[in-house]
Image (cartoon, rainbow, N blue to C red):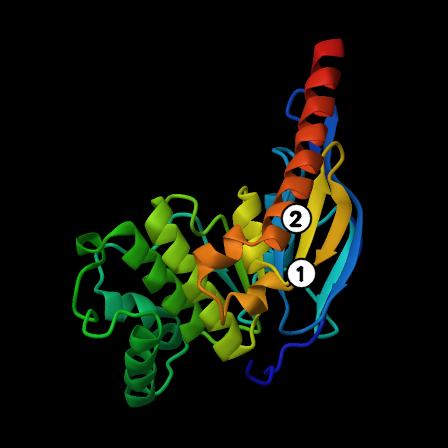
Amino acid sequence: MTEHGGGGQLRVESVDMVYELPKGGSVQALKDVSFDLEQGRLLTLLGPSGCGKTTLLNILAGFLAPTGGQVTLGGSAITGPGQDRGMVFQQGALFEWLSVEKNISFGPRMKRADKSGTSARVEDLLKTVGLGGFGEKMVYELSGGMQQRVALARCLANDPAMILMDEPLGALDALTREKMQSLILELWSETGKTIVLVTHSVEEALFLGDILFVMAPRPGRIERTYELPFAKMGLEVEPRELKRSPEFVDKREEILSLIWDMEEQIMGHEGEA
């Protein structure tokens, strides 16, 4: 794995998030969420619906301000979106009227970066994400998996310290999704970026996360933390072989049971309401 670049530690301190409802009352999406994430880690967030995974990710991105607590990256408070953080969404959020090359170069062009340097950077990123020779194609000509590769390249073009991913592979077919999982691991290894990824797939969370938080709902909080070997193993071992291994299967069943129990508790509470 490459040496980690600049960016520093992510620190989440006693974060609360309360949503006020239009007709009165409120919902507490997160309560007293605290953790430190070392630079260069790949964190996956997993849990039942309503546990606050995406809310937490949006706070890290600076799209939401928490109602309590503080978040810092490299010692600086996160108070809004910034160039030190890049976001990859479930749908690529690409500019369909622009070419692949212009999508990837959009950030550097907005910063008026050197044109020749940007062009070389785009070519390098296209090769990195397996899209060499596709720079002149229009986004709408690409498959869903290829569009997500463009979204990853566009994010990397801005050289953020931390990459945030909200269900980035959720809309892809199973085979493409598995290939993209391997690509994410390769990019993580090659760039040394800190990555925080939200997913609803237990298998994906286990395979990609070298650290995994299982979150519990009402209010959202970190229920359990797993330090995992599979992300680094996935750089050396064929993914299907790894996912069939007894260690992986046992951990998957343990976490599935944990989340299933949470879902049962939620349904029980709703039945009492």
The residue under label 1 is 228
Q: Residues within 10 Å of mark 2 (few under 14, many from 20)?
A: some
Q: Residue at x 30, y 76 (%)?
A: 127
Is there CB contact under 8 Å for labels 1 and 2?
Answer: yes
Judge left or right: residue 268 versus residue 54.
Answer: right
- Residue 185 position in % (x across, y down): 49, 67
Q: Quadrant of the N terminus?
A: bottom right
Judge left or right: residue 138 versus residue 187.
Answer: left
Query: Secondary structure under badge 2?
Result: helix
Is residue 136 visible in this depiction of the protein?
A: yes
Judge left or right: residue 90 versus residue 250.
Answer: left
Type of the residue with mark 2? Lys
Which mark is drawn over residue 251? Answer: 2
Relative depth, front residue between 25 and 132:
132
- Residue 51 position in % (x across, y down): 67, 37
State whether residue 73 is above or below residue 201: below
Which mark is drawn over residue 99? Answer: none
